[in-house]
Image: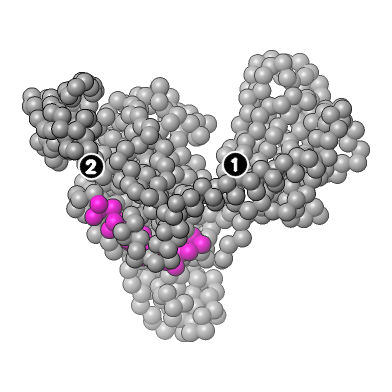
Amino acid sequence: MVLQRDAKIKIWGWASKNEEVKIHFIDSTYITKTNQVGEWSVNISELKSGGPYEMQIDASNSIKIKDILVGDVWVCSGQSNMGLPLGVLKDVYKDEISEINNPMIRQFSTFPRTNFSNRDSDFKFGIWQHADSNNIYGLTAAGYFFAKNIYEIYKVPIGLLNVNMGGSAAEAWISEESMKEFPIYYKELLKFKSPGYLELRNKQDDERANNWNRMLRINDIGLKDEKQLWSDPNLNISNWESMQIPGYWADTKVGNVNGVIWFRKEFYLTDKNTNGSAYLKLGRIVDSDSVFINGKFIGSTGSQYMPRNYEIQNDILNEGKNVIVVRVINYIHKGGFVPGKKYELLISGQKINLAGEWNYKIGATSEQLDDHLFTGKIPTGLFNGGIAPLLNYNIKGVLWYQGESNTSRAFEHYDLFKLLIKDWRKNWKQGDFPFIFVQLPNFVEVNVERTNYDWAIFRESQLKSLSIPNTGMAVAIDIGEYNDIHPVNKKDIGARLALAARKVAYNEQNIVYSGPIYKSMEIIEDKVILSFSNSGSGLVVKGGKLKSFEICGIDNEFYPAEAKIENNKILVWCSKVLLPVAVRYAWNNNPEDANLYNKEGLPASPFRTSELY
């Protein structure tokens, strides 16, 4: 456990009603009595960084809490990119993981539930863990790298309260009282507060999904004849067709069909290859897969967002020919093998590339299966179940990585996010504590149709949120992945969050904590001169000349622009625009060529000079 330093710490709990409770901590004893419902709390004196300490709580029974540190406590919240654990990234951060052994960094892990009726007072489950070899894989990657950076500078214990939910929407994290400011969301919340409504919705969705999967299995030709299962390595596939993998079958003559498609490929091993364990990497598959090698089931993954990494037992692989079969189910939108990922077999230090030509055959087609109700997107549910239990806990600040689930409503996000920050500060009753957030990275999710600029508009709303007092933003426009909503580079995310925190939370005055932020523009004839804050030691371009700038005239037609750095400003022009009125930079969902930085190596935030263009 880590308690917040330099703050009046509240200790609370439950016992029998009207029972005396004694709390022994360090050199003091605190005595209180429970109320009529058995609740008790005490405030203990402010403490400096230190520990470990022990706390004993005596009532009708006694509880002893050991190994308590006093330092800085940060809430890590949002969507799955905040919660993404180091275990998922173990191949990316092998060296870093091998060195993790710092008991001064700790994480409280829990699984928040949604509650639409009232505020939860506690979690159903929760555990404090050290950043050491026993707990490495469960640590939030972004949070850990943040904590590592902060600890190395200030040498104070860091506690991370890891409370997030993958796919959750911002409105889910806002209290019922504040949600009234968004009537459309408050109305939706009231539906879910109605007795029996949630249960009915879940029942209907369960029945719909179960029927869909049942009929798909019944209709799947690859499963109908037990003597000729399509996972059989000896199956006659003379009537199967071929397809290049990776790729989406919607981009082939198959078209955008939902249902089951079976894929099959042969590969060969020498006798030397078959010794030792093997690992199969199948990148990412949309939506779910079941994998067979030589007729034996290897494993399955039900979420399109999870990497496919399967361990293969020694007795499964053969010398000579081997056959891999993948049964892919697609529910909605584009199905297939995500491009740009690794598809390979790792064995005895060798890599066998599995990309290329595969055979395939459709097992069954079906109407699309719409998403099951996901309560992580319903207003207020996660505030009640995830934030309310923490409100008595003193904190240093909040780290927030969320937004992917709100990009389709980007125009409202500024007001929604502003409300969320205000709401948390009001309910925590600790003043305007630091709120540090990640600006969404570059991304184009190829299997979901989106408007052209929803992510760009969303990033702009995040940039505007810096006007809220005591906020900081980590720009991530250069570390996303076009084919993965979960980019693996959480090390730089953590480092940039730490830089922002050093300025906002730790009040370092001279630190360059951000990349260039657009400040103002001046139009001189056919050119636009842009000025920036946070330029640090100076503006620089990474890789040749400046890219990703566009310019327009009064006709609102944007053209790719020339741009160069002059006197620590940016000069922008285009021969097709003689009377410019506006400029934009990296204004795309995935501006892969954005290359404006400061000399400290921090990227400029995307921007446009006017919301009118």
Q: Residue at x 76, y 33 (%)?
A: 325
- Please tell me which residue lies in front, 251 or 300: 300
- Please tell me which residue lies in front, 473 or 451: 451
Q: Position of residue 161 (x, y in %)?
A: 32, 38
Q: Residues within 10 Å of mark 2 (few under 14, many from 20)?
A: some
- Please tell me which residue lies in front, 30 or 351: 30
Identify the image quadrant of residue 467: bottom left
Q: Residue at x 22, y 30 (%)?
A: 15
Left or right of 587, for residue 324 = right
Query: Residue 303: which disc?
Result: 1
**Marks 1 and 2 in Cβ contact (< 8 Å):** no
Look at label 1 and name its amino acid: Ser
Q: Is residue 592 above or below residue 149?
A: below
Q: Nearer the viewer, mark 1 or mark 2?
A: 2
Q: Secondary structure at mark 2?
A: loop
Q: Residue at x 36, y 32 (%)?
A: 126
Q: Is residue 557 above or below residue 163?
A: below
Q: Residue at x 91, y 38 (%)?
A: 238
Look at label 2 and name its amino acid: Asn
Q: Is residue 519 above or below residue 47?
A: below
Magenta span: 407-427
Location of mark 2 (residue): 392
On-image quarter of the N terminus: top left
Q: Position of residue 222 (x, y in %)?
A: 82, 37
- Please tell me which residue lies in front, 570 or 230: 230
Q: Secondary structure at mark 1?
A: loop
Identify the image quadrant of residue 465: bottom left
Residue 93 counted in the magenta span = no
Q: Is residue 38 visible?
A: yes
Q: Position of residue 65 (x, y in %)?
A: 23, 23
Left or right of 483, for residue 16 = left
